[in-house]
Image (cartoon, rainbow, N blue to C red):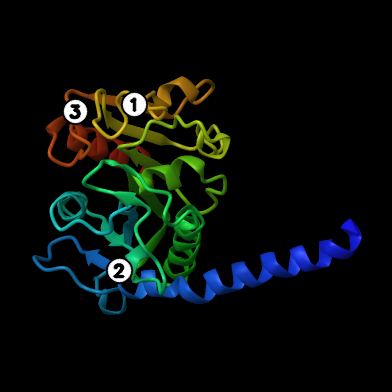
Amino acid sequence: MLNKLKPIVLLSVFIVGHVFAQNVEKSWEDAVVYIPGKIFTTSVNKIAVDKPMPVVIYLHGCAGLNRVHDAAWGSFIADQGFIVIQPDSMATPGRISNCSAAAKKSTHAFPQAHKYRQLEIDYALEKIQTSSWADKQNIFIMGHSEGGVAIAIRKNHTGLAGGIISGWTCTSYVPEFQGIASPKETPTLVIASVDDDWRKGTALEGNCANFAEGRSNFKQVDLPGTDHATAGQAEARRAVKEFLNQYQKK
């Protein structure tokens, strides 16, 4: 009976993966793009620069692109000389939020969210690698909250110069989301408030540094306070600037 079921299971997995793959391009097409020296944002099909530039792929949190927090990171990182691309996960057909911003917790309403985020990174990398405007040696990823989870659990860092985890603890009651999955040599920066009110007093309370053994290119910056957002803190901005400068290949 199990042998008869196996082809059906494999076919189902293929179909689900195929549907994801068909839809993920919308996250890229509707991405918000920040370009160094430009006042206004643009779209991925209108990127125009004089020479190839380093890139940061930035993944927003579970509620979608935030016009304050994510915009602040986009502008700041662009000021450091990077093209910042913020894919819009919510643009994918059928995509809904997997959290309640008001309650400051996951609702598990869209458990496929974490698969979507990995496919968004894959698709963005594919498009960036075939572009004329990207410095292919200097492609970084950064994610906040749900986006930070995506960076932490991602195993494949081929083509990436480093990753930044914002607003996530690498701690979960679900083994799949516990720890840091990237190769140990991958440069990794973590920025999070020590008393983050999304995590404090829950099973998600913890510290990514607890999973950093053997990671020589790892740094965690513990921010004071309870704020889940990180862009407003000077210490966080300074850490991101230093990280990108340190690991950018000249």
Instruction: Report x, y in % for residue 190.
Output: 34, 33
Q: Amino acid at mark 2?
A: Ala
Q: From mark 1 to mark 3, how far is it between C-alphas?
A: 17 Å
Instruction: Report x, y in % for residue 14.
Output: 68, 69
Q: Say which element carries label 2.
A: loop
Q: Amino acid at mark 1?
A: Gln
Q: From mark 3 to mark 2, how far is it between C-alphas?
A: 29 Å
Please state which of residues 2 and 45 is positioned toward the viewer in this rendering. 2
Report the residue marked by disc 3. Answer: 226
Assess disc 1: are there few (<14), some (14-19) or many (≥20) residues with their C-alpha within 10 Å of its C-alpha.
some
Q: Residue at x 26, y 23 (%)?
A: 194
Cβ atoms at labels 3 and 2 below 8 Å apart: no
Is any part of residue 34 visible from this angle?
A: yes
Q: Residue at x 44, y 47 (%)?
A: 150
First in sequence: mark 1 vs mark 2: 2
Assess disc 3: are there few (<14), some (14-19) or many (≥20) residues with their C-alpha within 10 Å of its C-alpha.
some
* Nearest-to-viewer mark from 3 and 2: 3
Name the disc covering residue 220, or none.
1
Please state which of residues 50 and 196 is positioned toward the viewer in this rendering. 196
Quadrant, the N terminus: bottom right
In this picture, is 52 found above or below 56? below
Q: Say which element carries label 3.
A: loop
First in sequence: mark 1 vs mark 3: 1
Q: Say which element carries label 1.
A: strand
